[in-house]
Image (tube, rainbow, N blue to C red):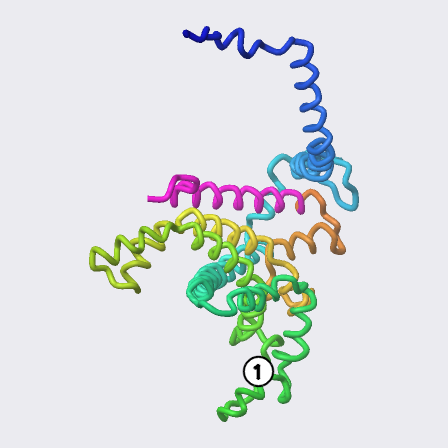
Amino acid sequence: MVTPQTSPATAAPDRPRPVRRRRARSQALVFWLFVGPFAVGLLIFVYVPILWSLWLSFYDSQSTVTPTEFVGLRNYQDMLSSGPFRESLITFTLFAAFIVPLTFAASLGLALMVHRIRFAQAFFRSVFFLPTACSYVVASLIWKLSIFNGVRFGLANTVLEVFGQDPIPWLSVAQPPWYWFPIISVRLWLQVGFYMILFLAGLQRIPRELYEAAWVDGASPGWKTFRHITLPQLRNTSVAVLLLLFIAAYQAFDEFYNLLGNVVNYARTPLQQLYITALGASQDYGRGSAGAMILSLLIIFVTLFQGKLFGFGKPAE
């Protein structure tokens, strides 16, 4: 007996239009209930201040956030001429030249070691990640008062004394620039665990079949498999880590402010200098806004250049 075939149109008739419209409206309502407060907060607390700072940067406005006299690009010329803000950009460049490659290498090395061990992996992952939960202010004060305090009984000078070296005033002199050791080490200790977690997530996504195929072809575990398999598979993670490290370096403030104080003028970051310009004795919001715009453009330029250079977002080879 031949069973009569039912056409798809008769088997699954379209839902009535009013029902579909109600469902679409319900989904849109749920979407805006979740996203709406975040979008409004983003608009009010992020984009409006950015646009207001851009507007303010073309005006002379001291001790007031209301634009008074239009000065064109004069605030930008003043900030980019020889002065504290340009010196702070040089300080940042030195800081980024040390902290970005050091953090990248240390976090990748830790992730490779933690990924390989077969026991207590969760313990080591937690131990290395724990400093990320510590405040920059608290860590800076510990570094300043206990480890690099510059007196004979400080931890760093005690270690030097064991090797027959004289105590070093780590934070109180500009030459030689010993202050870079506390600044670099506290930033490294605080953030290396976070980037280790990102690399661990990337390592766990690499198919094990790639390594097994390489071993069948005669490649031995070690540098060759790391160079030809692990590193290319981690390309997107590596680019993301580099982007975050550069942005974090541009935003460095807490460790400089708490380790060196506000009176030291030989190592100020751009944010620290903008803080002094806009909220110091002069309260020059026009120049402070111009400096903030310059810093934002630098971050955007470096981010886009890195993404273009390393092919951020492209699939792994």
Q: Based on the displayed image, in which of its 4 quarters is residue 20 positioned?
A: top right
Q: Amino acid at mark 1?
A: Ala
Residue 191, relative to residue 80: is it above or below?
below
Q: Quadrant of the C terminus?
A: top left
Q: Residue furthest left?
A: 218
Residue 235, relative to residue 92: is it above or below?
above
Residue 86, relative to residue 182: is it above or below?
above
Q: Is residue 40 left or right of residue 10?
A: right
Q: Based on the displayed image, in which of its 4 quarters is residue 182 positioned?
A: bottom right
Is residue 140 covered in magenta? no
Q: Residue at 48% across / 48% down in the picture?
A: 240
Residue 115, relative to residue 243: is it above or below?
below
- Span of residues in magenta: 288-317
From the top left corner, tell me how far across and down residue 107 is, in percent: 48, 62
Q: Quadrant of the N terminus?
A: top left
Question: Closest to the observer: 224 or 221?
Answer: 221
From the top left corner, tell me how far across and down residue 212 is, in percent: 29, 55
Q: Is residue 131 visible?
A: yes
Is residue 304 covered in magenta? yes
Q: Residue at 40% across / 40% down in the picture?
A: 308
Instruction: Name the residue that disc number 1 marks.
Output: 156
Q: Residue at 54% across / 42% down in the picture?
A: 297
Judging from the image, what secondary structure is the residue with disc 1 in?
helix
From the top left corner, tell me how far across and down residue 192 is, in percent: 53, 63
Q: Is residue 97 visible?
A: no
From the top left corner, tell me how far across and down residue 67 is, in percent: 74, 35
